[in-house]
Amino acid sequence: MKSIALAAVIYGLAAVVSFFVAFLITGIHRVIVRFKKPETN
Amino acid sequence: MDISQIALNLFQGIATLAQADTGIAIGRVGLIALGMLLVYLGKKEILEPLLMVPMGLGMAAVNAGVLFLPGGHHGTLFVDPLVSDTTPLMNVLQIDFLQPIYTFTFSNGLIACLVFMGIGVLLDVGYVIQRPFLSMFLAICAELGTVATFPIAVALGLSMNDAASISMVGGADGPMVLYTSLMLSKDLFVPITIVAYLYLGLTYGGYPYLIKLMVPAKLRGLPSVPPKRVITVSSGDKLTFAVVACTILCLLFPVAAPLFLSLFIGVAVRESGLKKIEEFIAGPLLYGATFFLGLMLGILCEAGTILNPRILLLLLLGILALLLSGIGGLIGGYIVHFATGRKFNPTIGIAGVSCIPTTAKVVQKSVSEVNPYAVVLPEALGANISGVITTAILTGLYVTLVPLFR
């Protein structure tokens, strides 16, 4: 029972951290796009 | 001394075979045959030749080259994986020819980190940046075996540490299994790592059948869905992601920090345009580390070490973990398929199993068999690279949390 609960906690935490990484990727990209200087001729 | 004694002293490999227990003798002969089979399968490219050729030959040689050591014990001059005290270790370092490589690169996880650095250099995180949430969702679904095998292994009598190590086979990432088992189950890390590397070949050979079983041909042929807006990803974006993700993941899981640093330093080198270092890591370093990893794995397959009573259980749990991860990935693919109005090809889900780039290639091959014009490789690679990241996260979680609950 303890191992099932631990497995569930680990899966849940892994999902949270993975989506946090995905959120980070999107966030970083948005920040970079916002602050990127427009190209001039 | 009669002639038979002289012959036995001359051909000690045969003499030790004749003197050994029946189980050990059969095990030695069986492992010699298995080693030769692995070399053959590697040559035929049925299994990964980079790993299987040195591993198979090492396995055959270590089980053939057993001799009489002082005190009448049987042993080899290759390596002693069980010696850990300083004084005997210093002696063995001067006798066994592969002991320095084992002690200074293998038993401390360095070789796993070197392989991971090589993988980092080969990763193009641009595929993940294009579809981060989709890729991560598929990858986390494809970790089902990594998590579900853990309570099953505990129920079958393994300790929590050993159960966590064998469960990592579900992530299909050899260096991670090596690292977790080194951290959590030093006594079983040899059989667990061997089981892991033997099974990685199964993702190439077995997953196409699982795909055919779970995904009907009509759905397998679905073409890729173009993203709503195409994002231009520069090398600066990828480098920023590598630096930030590495720092945050190290902050969250310091126990797995060497793995995170190794992976993301590879990505950083690739995206910084350090061509010479990139060539060095992707070439001599990665191939050298893979060669010695294969050779060490083969050498560690000595009958006395490998004939652990728990090996059958580990073999069963390893295959269960990989099977459940494949099923989990395809379930994830189906969830996205229905969520996108039946447009998404559910086959892509299995690419979340992080055996990079094998599972992505398996997906593309399975799709191309039904629809030669469908290109799903970019989505598959996105899920595949995310799989490496989620497996590293799970390694961090297992290594950090499991010792707290012993």
Image: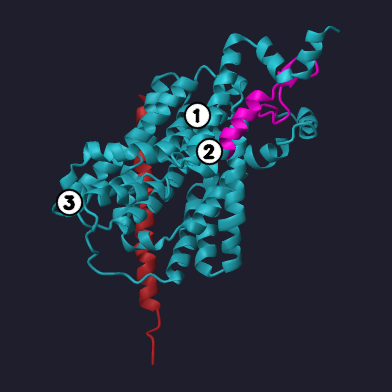
Going 51% across and 30% down the picture, which residue do you hit? B37
Q: Which secondary structure lies at badge 2? A: helix
Q: In which quarter of the image is residue B290?
A: top right
- The residue that disc 3 covers is B339
User: In the rendered structure, which disc, 1 or 3, sits on the residue that comes first in sequence?
Assistant: 1
Q: Which secondary structure lies at badge 3? A: helix
Three-letter residue code for mark 1: Asn
- The residue that disc 1 covers is B161
Is B372 inside the magenta-drawn segment?
no
Instruction: Name the spot of residue B181 as percent of width and height, x first.
Output: 53, 34
Is B74 inside the magenta-drawn segment?
yes
Residue closest to the far bottom: A41
**Residue A38 sits above or below residue B247 on the image:** below
- The residue that disc 2 covers is B52
Q: Report the quarter where the C terminus of chain A lies.
A: bottom left
Front residue of B285/B26: it is B26
Asked whether the residues under marks 1 and 3 belong to the same chain, the reply is yes
Q: Which chain is red?
A: A
Within 10 Å of disc 1 (Cα), the crowding (few <14, some 14-19, many 20+) is: many
Say which colour chain B has: cyan
In space, the residues marked 1 and 3 are separated at their CA atoms by 38 Å
